[in-house]
Image: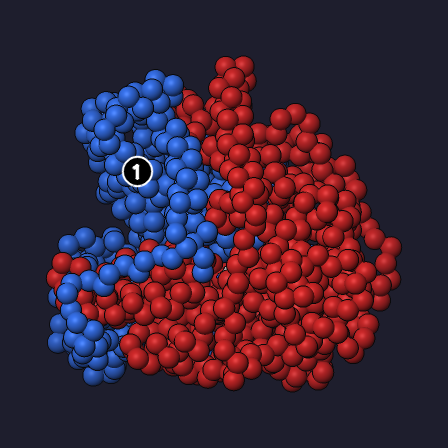
Chain colours: A red, B blue
Amino acid sequence: MKSEASKIPNAPPDNFTPAERTEREFGRLTSKEHLYVSQHISSEPLPEPIMDEPPYFILICTYLNYLILIIIGHIRDFFGQIFYPADFKALTGQNGLAPWYSGFESFYVRRLKMRLDDCFARPICGAPGRFIKCFERITDKVNVNGSYHYTGDVVECLNLSSYNYLGFAQSSGTCTDAALASVEQYGTSACGPREQIGTTSLHVECERVIAEFVGKPSALVFSMGFGTNANLFTSLVNSKCLVISDELNHASIRFGVRMSGASVKVFPHNDMEALEALLRAQISAGQPKSHRPWKKIIVAVEGLYSMEGNLCNLPKLVELREKYRFFLFVDEAHSIGALGPNGKGICDYFGVSPNKIDLLMGTVTKSFGATGGYVAADTAVIDRLRLDIATNVYGESIAPPVLAQIISSLNIIDGKVNPGEGTERLQRIAFNSRYLRLALKRLGFIVYGADDSPVIPVLLFLPAKMPAFSRMMYEHKIAVVVVGYPATPLTSGRVRLCVSAALTKEDLDRVIEAMSEVGDKLFLKFSSGIAGGAKKKGEAPRWALDDVLANTARDCTISMA
Amino acid sequence: MSTTTIVIPESLNNIHIYVLDLYRRFAGLPGASIVIGYIKASYKDDPLRSVFELALLLFAVKYFLSSKKQANKPTLAKLSEKEVDDLCQEWEPEPLAFPLGELEKWQLADIPVTQGSVGPHACVDARDVLNLASLDFLNFNSNAVIKAAAKQTIMKSGVGACGPPNFYGTQDYHVRAEEDLAEFLGAERAMVYGQDFNTNTSVLPSFVKRGDLCIVDSGVGVSTQNALKMSRCRVQWFNHNDMDHLEEILQELQPGLAEEKPITRRFIVSEGLFVNFGDYPDLHKLVELKEKYRYRLFLDESYSIGVLGKTGRGLPELFGIPRSSIEITTGSMALAFASSGGFCVGESDMIQHQRISSLAFVFSASLPPYCARVTSTALHLITNGDLTSEAESKIVASLNTKSESLSELFSSDRSLQPFVLVKSIPLSPVIHMRLSPKYREMLQLPPVYGGPQSAVAQAWSRGLEAEYFLDETYNLENFLLSKIVALCKSRDVLITRSKRILHHEVVSMVPELLVCVTDGVSVEELAIAFHVVKESILAVTQQVNNHTAFRRLEDEL
Ligand SMILES: Cc1ncc(COP(=O)(O)O)c(C=O)c1O
């Protein structure tokens, strides 16, 4: 049982006026020049993502770093089991029961991740908008089970961690009013599965609004994005069908495909040649053993990859779809709202008609300040799914306040409500993304991803630099997310900055200054220049901070080279 | 893409396999036996660990030696490009989704759409109906305290949490709800998930892996069935609530398991109040057996928390058994608590492991903070403000009285007995009624639909969509029940029916009428509802009273 001391304290009251609070959740635009329209110019070729590589010694250090961590981990395991058996009871098993998990399986987590445990799951209070308030917490002895004491204080940090692309994480305004009204009118729950009782007129309206927004005839909405993918494929494919999946696809897609029992083939990330070769091989060979033709083939990709910041090559995928007649599934979890001149995601960005994509899936978690997922497709497909998707039949239905948030935010983006507000949000995220990305490149960081991506991964490589970076930024009162293995390849630990329309250019300047300082201290500026940002072609970019701040705002709206 | 990006297998689980494979290949090399002998001696019982480190080293070597260009795998067989082109041209895929047939379309229209609040009364098709289809057992969806708490939270935190729990998606309200759930249920720790249906599918596979063993009640719901499928463990089914059968299986397996080394993780899996039957297992016996045979117990209490026990703490309270006797408890917050999401409670180590490795927790955004707050508020309402209180909860007692009275009306009514059979126990707020075996025989209906070795299961494994999406008799029996539901609705009482899908389930089933009691409905209203439902059942069953009449229903589709 938990002692009182380790319970989370009540959030201390802040002394902001409502106007100040609004400003701290969504900063006012400071100059009309800090806007940009996110769009791929169709005459230009799709820029291939350039993955810059660090100097060899960085890689060698990374391996040595892991080696040392592993050796120390084993030594601690060895002596720990002798001297602190109580801390290891989950690993040793008791009363003739097997341990909860094996020491091997959990070695990484116990010995590597626990070292930076304080960088994860920091509890916060208040809407995760432009700033977030993190509870201060301390841990006394060697922390084996993630327990902390709270000091009762909160630290307000600039927020580059939340999925809040369009800045809808707010506790006042049009969307909040709609959510509050829906609580009054509908309550907090839909009271059962969609098929039995959980379909209110609000659900019907929300599905209509989503379908219209993404440009498909029909849509279904669910209370969780992960659950949407996890339960979608069983209703579409079976063991005689093939799903071809990008190697970096999200865990939920892999989960759903595995649940369906369909055959799975994986192609290297974004490699369209490999995909075509795979398609040709699979269509001509058919099912294994029987060599009967596949009943269906689905190619599953994401619009914007959340760990790399890469876009899928939609024009090429659509071309291949015409040629090979597979069904195209695009997960727009991160791209819907965040990309395209109208915020309609990857199709909008590339100027491709949504008709060319069979299944448009997305989540409303990242751009719209809500929670949940949707699938949009032709009516015949949605009709089947409506009756067959397990969540609709057996699981909870999405709750009214969330629906109200979705409907109102989509209406704002479309300009149906508060004309002008949606456009401003869209153009701010586009500018902010490019500005921060170019500035970091110029400083000499290795940055992955597409120019217009609001996800900006900055490479750290060494596992030891992850907690150091996170803590130093936290001292600058900037909240960032560091990710390492297993979410990324072992050697490319990174910090993932999520840009938001709620941030002002001045906020980003603060980030750039802090990152420049931390980058010098941690030796992170080692890009070669092949990914852009160099002053002169062929040179490694190492701009001075003042130079970056003085020129980047204008330059990023012209060219990202 | 350059070759520097290493492909890391999708989970640690796969590394096992990957490493094992590597290990086998390595063992075949000349001289390897000396190295292996050395490694084995240094890490007596965990050679995998050393191999993992070795793999790391090998990888480093490989990295420096690897060439920049990755050769494309040669395409299969010796077909010429032209032949492949032709084959690709010829290939005709089936439609993306199997289209709804004429016989199925009625099901779309059969989904009720409510206008406004779903409470004890609801507006359906512009009619005000008494709502006996809702799973809001404690009527919290219409509760002013709950609504005020939700609104207050939205005015503080907005709607979405905007991030996974580990990346700044955890708010004070989430932590508080977890503390409250643990305290209320008397468990060490708790955690909340974003959706109830995906809780089991993520909790169980965090612990149960390929080669582990689960002994499962054949009445468990789809989310648990899916969890077993995802964990790829060995599954043994015992007859629903049949403790003798369970013990028989445990006994039979015992000798083999005693020799296993290292011991595998073993679970007995059951539910608090079965979603499919509205009954509960003999928990005394379950606990006794799991202790005797050294298993852990996994219990899904989605339908029993807030319903069973003097204070709504679920099945263990009803049996006077401490929560700590159940290793893993999961549940839904979208039912009795009028919130959203699922939860899991148990000992600290078990919860901590999930926070880092459970897929639907790690790779999904947190629950909206207001939902967490609603859960906390609901718990305080149930316990009258004191989460550890032992005093009887008025609201739970009131629900129980109502459930029992309505259940009693249905099961004791003589005129209904030839036609329907009540499957649920009196305490279940969802009353499960199926057509009686005799009546079903009269209509020449099969004893059950689906299940192992059934035509549907075979069609599923052979990928025959036309056969697994539509079982005509099952469709027609459902239609018959929907006529009863529709007749009730025309008399302003909304009930519902099970809408289970054959190809999603590995267990067999019989369609049921579901009448759901919530605390917002008064005893008088329940009495009126009983008459409406009874008359509707009689009217429809008397009209369709033989095989021919049943088959003629097809014309109405
Ligand atoms: C590509 C992708 N799909 C699905 C999801 C899951 O969405 P949610 O967080 O709403 O469960 C995510 C979230 O991280 C994602 O990145």
Q: Position of residue B217 (x, y in %)?
A: 29, 43
Chain ID at mark 1 = B
Residue in the image at 32% along x and 70% along y: A276
Task: State whether residue B190 is above or below residue B71.
Answer: above
Q: Is residue A469 left or right of residue B98?
A: right
Packing grade of label 1 (10 A; few <14, some 14-19, many >=20) is some
The total of numbered circles placed on residues is 1
Quadrant of the frame with the N terminus of chain A: top right
Image quadrant of residue A512?
Answer: bottom right
Q: Residue furthest top?
A: A83
Q: Position of residue A178 (x, y in %)?
A: 67, 72
Q: Amino acid at mark 1?
A: Leu
Q: Is residue A542 left or right of residue A496?
A: right
Q: Position of residue B434 (x, y in %)?
A: 28, 60
Task: State whether residue B420 is above or below residue B308.
Answer: below
Q: Is residue B412 visible?
A: no
Q: Position of residue B389 (x, y in %)?
A: 61, 36
Task: State whether residue A470 is above or below residue A249.
Answer: above
Residue in the image at 28% along x and 39% along y: B21
Q: Is residue A115 visible?
A: yes
Task: State whether residue B228 is above or below residue A411.
Answer: above
Q: Of residues A321 and A22, which is closer to you in this image? A: A321
Residue in the image at 18% along x and 53% along y: B452
Q: Is residue B453 left or right of residue B301?
A: left
Q: Of residues A272 and A135, which is closer to you in this image? A: A272
Q: Which residue is mark 1?
A: B22
